[in-house]
Image: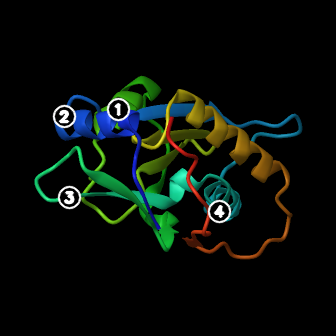
Amino acid sequence: MRTKPGRLEQFFFAKAASHMDSCIVCAAEYRNSNQDVVLTRDILYPALCQVIQTHAALGVRVVFKPQSVNDCSFVKLDNVDLDKHVRFSFGGDLEHIMQAELSTEFDTGAKGPLWRVLVLDANNVLFSFHHGIGDGLSGLAFHTTLLRALQSASADSGAPESVVAIPNSELTPSI
């Protein structure tokens, strides 16, 4: 599936190609009333699978025509390997970590998605994504969907799969 980005998305891809824009980072702390939440791979991966299958923009990459940042297409990925796009870290100053995330550009020439997740201190989730696939409200939508997926998770879901198949869903049309 190839989808032509709208003018706004193309603008953000051109800005990123000129190193004038990096990404958006949206962070949330996950807690519940009974105990502290510890987001392990076994808990997080099944929930992330639901999030990816809900939001089509998380299952695409961008492909540019040679010599042009203005002529690009979104291409649906077959799958996403969470082990390559989700990191777990303990300790560190949140402000410095946020600055590092904001200054880390996405490789739009890679064959992976335009987002990454950092789980900090087992309950803080930093969702970083290219401005070409979403805006600040997209970060809120990600965290809302992740929270619902975590709340609905079964206690015995077995060992999580790290590779998530991308469904054949359409991207929301550009404005």
Any part of residue 8 in sight:
yes
Distance between mark 1 and mark 3 Cα atoms: 26 Å
Q: Which mark is residue 30?
A: none
11 relative to 49, above or below? above
Circles 3 and 4 in contact, beta carbons < 8 Å: no
Query: Which residue carries the number 1 mark?
Result: 102
Query: Which residue carries the number 3 mark?
Result: 65
Query: Which residue carries the number 2 mark?
Result: 19
Query: Which residue carries the number 4 mark?
Result: 49
Q: Nearer the viewer, mark 1 or mark 2?
A: 2
Earlier in the chain: of badge 1 and badge 3, it is 3
Going 89% across and 39% down the picture, which residue do you hit?
34
Q: Nearer the viewer, mark 2 or mark 3?
A: 3
Q: Amino acid at mark 4?
A: Cys
Earlier in the chain: of badge 4 and badge 1, it is 4
Is 6 positioned to the left or the right of 135 in the image? left
Distance between mark 4 and mark 2 Cα atoms: 31 Å
Earlier in the chain: of badge 2 and badge 3, it is 2
Residue sitting nearer the eye, 138 or 42? 138
Q: Nearer the viewer, mark 4 or mark 2?
A: 2
149 relative to 121, above or below? below
Distance between mark 2 and mark 3 Cα atoms: 19 Å
Is 50 positioned to the left or the right of 148 in the image? left
Earlier in the chain: of badge 4 and badge 2, it is 2
Is 160 positioned to the left or the right of 154 in the image? left
Earlier in the chain: of badge 3 and badge 4, it is 4
Circles 4 and 2 in contact, beta carbons < 8 Å: no
Residue sitting nearer the eye, 6 or 78? 6
Q: Amino acid at mark 2?
A: His
Distance between mark 4 and mark 1 Cα atoms: 24 Å
